[in-house]
Image: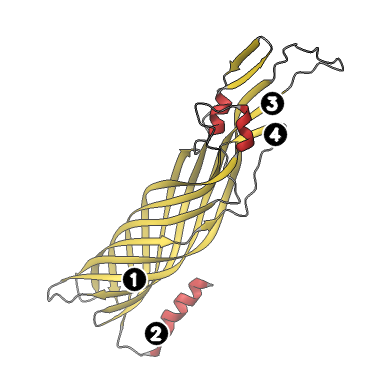
Amino acid sequence: MRERVLFGILSICITSGAFAAEVYVSLGLGVAEDQVDLHSAAPSLGESCNSTSVSVSCIGQLSIEPVTTEFDLGNSIASTASLGFEWDSWRLEAEYVGRKHDGQSLPQPASPLDFLAGSIGFGATGVGGTIGFFPSREPRHEISNFGLHQVFLNALYSFQTGVSWRPYIGLGAGVARVRYRYLSEGIELEIVPPSFGRDPVPEGVFVPRVFSARTVTSIDAELRDNVLGVQFLAGIDRALSEDVTAFTTLRWSRFEASSFSNLSHDRSGSNVPALVLGTPSPALDELDGIGGFSLTAGIRYTF
C-alpha cells in the first residue's frame, strides 16, 4: 500500500505538467554493508554474587536485564532501479533497492548462571564435591538469510560545475520489507533426583542430585516486517551522450525497529524440572539500528 502511494505521487507530478521535466529510468549494481542491533534480555545476579563466587543460593537473586548485541551482517550485492523526472538541477524519483545477507552467528550474552552450570556444589555431613558440566555446544544466537527490499521517494540536487562531471546530494524516505531467520540457543540445566522407591532416605546419608547440561534451541523462526526509514545519498554522474548518463552513488540508510513480540519459546522435548540459561526473553526482543552503507554504479536513460 505504501509503495502504491509513493508511485502515485510520482505519477501525478509527471502527468500534471507542472514542471518542464524530463522523465528517466536508471539501473544500478553495487555492494552493501548492513548492521543490526538485537535488544534482548539476559539473567543477571545481585551484587553479592559474581562469576567467581556464584552458588545455588544466588538463584533467588536472579533478575532479567536488557542486553544489546551488535550484528555485522557483512557485505552483499545491492541492486537498484528508479523512475523519476529531472528539471534544472533537481530530480525526484521513486527508487527500489534490494539486497540479501547471509547473516552472523554470535555467542549468547554471558550469564552468571552459566558459571553455575559449570560448577555445582553438593554435600552432606563429611561429604562434599563439585560436578563439572560441558554442554554439547556453546549457546548462541544467529540472524541469517537477512533481506531488505526497500522503496524510497528521493529528492536530489545536482551541482552545476560547467563540465561533464556533476556531484549531487539527496534525501529519501520510504518503507522496507525486512525478512530474516532468528535462531536462539541456550544451556538447559536438568536436575534429576535419584529414585529410592517408597523407602525414606536415612538421616545423615549423602544423597546426590544428578545434574546434566545440554544446549537446546529456544527460538527458531522466520520473521517478516515492514519498517519505515530514511536515507541520505551523495554521488557523481557524467553524461555519456545526450540521453545516457553514468553515475556512482553512496548511500546511508536507517530503519525503525522490528519487534519480536509475536515470538514464543519452543522447548519441545525438554524435561522438567529444568532451567534454561542464557536464553533471551522474546517479550523484550527487537531489531534496531537496521541499515548501513551501500555503493552502487549504473546507467540513467532520459527519454
Please rate how many residues cluster around mark 3, counting C-alpha atoms within 10 Å: few if below 14, some from 14 to 19, many from 20. Answer: some
- Tell me if residue 219 can be seen: yes
The percent position of residue 155, horizontal first and vertical second, equals 33, 75
- Residue bearing the label numbered 3: 191
The Cα–Cα distance between marks 2 and 3, rounded to whole angstroms, is: 69 Å
Q: What residue type is labelled 2?
A: Cys
Cα distance, mark 2 to mark 4? Answer: 59 Å
SS at circle 3? strand
Under mark 4, the amino acid is Gly
**Total marks in image:** 4
Direction right: furthest residue: 198
Q: Mark 1 and 4 residues: CB-CB less than 8 Å, in contact?
A: no
Within 10 Å of disc 4 (Cα), the crowding (few <14, some 14-19, many 20+) is few
**Residue holding disc 1:** 171
Quadrant of the snapshot with the C terminus: bottom left
Query: Could you say whether the residue bearing mark 2 is in a helix, strand or loop?
Result: helix
Q: Name the residue under label 4.
A: 269
Q: In this view, does 52 lie above or below 181?
A: above
Identify the mark nearer the N-term, 2 or 4: 2
Left-right relation of 31 to 184: left
Name the outermost residue toward the front.
48
The residue beneath circle 2 is 13
